[in-house]
């Protein structure tokens, strides 16, 4: 079997919402992944306060407080959390990719009836998608090797942003539960503050993902998530 190609070059975009359509093909790019990016960004910027669970009850929840209420930019990742959501995320990304020559959409018709809509990538789109996929495989390898590729990392914050976008955060949480902070920051060059922030966020984001999935499934099945 041919080995998956990887790249250490991150697919930087002006707006990471633009590539949600392609990220979903790889396994990430869901609303909860973008929410994880927001919480990580706010924690790094010290816009939220995380109170760790010091209860004797192990499953007691982690509490988070927003410390500031900054003006939201209309097209920011954060603004996505306050509109009606999952379909908008995919459709807005798809429309961006079509309008900018990455994707072509075709509709098959029979007489006056629409049968099926399909999309395929242009050469430009294939290049972007392959770049995303190669970076995804690189991050998988990075996590599997306990982040021990320090010479290739220019921005750990950027790395953790893409880890969340690709839906790989759970793998990182599980790693960090088993590896003490001092074993991560010294050999890998990962900032200790970032490690501690991520560890504090982990229980909250784990609960968030479970709750979001349950609510989404309940809504899709027509049941109330609160009953």
Image (cartoon, rainbow, N blue to C red):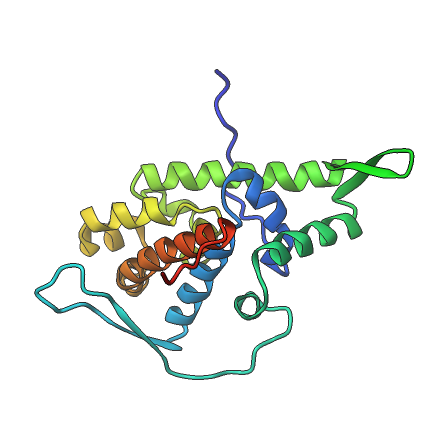
Q: Looking at the image, which residue is at 59% across and 64% down?
A: 84
Lateral position of residue 170 relative to residue 87, left or right: left
**Rendered location of residue 28, percent (x, y):** 50, 45
Q: Looking at the image, which residue is at 62% across and 60% down?
A: 15
Q: Can residue 13 be seen from the camera position used here?
A: no
Lateral position of residue 119 relative to residue 11, left or right: right
Lateral position of residue 139 relative to residue 204, left or right: right
Image mark count: 0
Lateral position of residue 186 relative to residue 134, left or right: left
Q: Looking at the image, which residue is at 41% across and 38% down?
A: 140
Query: Which quadrant holds residue 63?
Result: bottom left
Query: Residue lying furthest right in this view?
Result: 111
Query: Residue lying furthest top in this view?
Result: 1
Whether 104 is drawn above or below 156: the answer is above
Q: Looking at the image, which residue is at 78% across and 41% down?
A: 105
Query: Which quadrant holds residue 16?
Result: bottom right
**Rendered location of residue 65, percent (x, y):** 33, 78
Q: Which image quarter is the C terminus in?
A: bottom left
Whether 139 is drawn above or below 220: the answer is above
**Rendered location of residue 74, percent (x, y):** 64, 73
Q: Can residue 82 be seen from the camera position used here?
A: yes
**Rendered location of residue 73, percent (x, y):** 61, 75
């Amino acid at each position: 079997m041919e080995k998956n190609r990887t790249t250490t070059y991150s697919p930087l975009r002006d707006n990471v919402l633009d590539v949600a359509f392609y990220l979903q093909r790889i396994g990430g790019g869901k609303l909860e992944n973008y929410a994880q990016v927001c919480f990580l960004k706010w924690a790094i910027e010290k816009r939220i306060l995380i109170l760790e669970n010091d209860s004797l009850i192990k499953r007691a929840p982690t509490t988070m407080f927003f410390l500031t209420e900054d003006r939201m930019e209309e097209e920011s990742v954060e603004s996505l959390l306050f509109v009606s959501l999952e379909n908008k995320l995919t459709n807005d990304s798809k429309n961006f990719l079509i309008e900018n020559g990455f994707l072509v959409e075709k509709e098959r018709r029979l007489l006056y009836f629409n049968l099926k809509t399909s999309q395929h990538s242009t050469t430009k789109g294939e290049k972007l998608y392959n770049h995303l996929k190669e970076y995804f495989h690189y991050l998988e390898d990075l996590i599997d090797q306990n982040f021990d590729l320090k010479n290739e990392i220019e921005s750990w914050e950027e790395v953790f942003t893409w880890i969340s976008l690709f839906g790989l955060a759970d793998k990182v949480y599980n790693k960090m539960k088993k590896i003490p902070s001092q074993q991560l920051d010294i050999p890998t060059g990962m900032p200790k503050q970032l490690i501690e922030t991520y560890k504090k966020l982990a229980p909250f984001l784990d609960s968030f993902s479970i709750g979001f999935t349950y609510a989404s499934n309940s809504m899709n099945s027509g049941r109330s998530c609160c009953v």
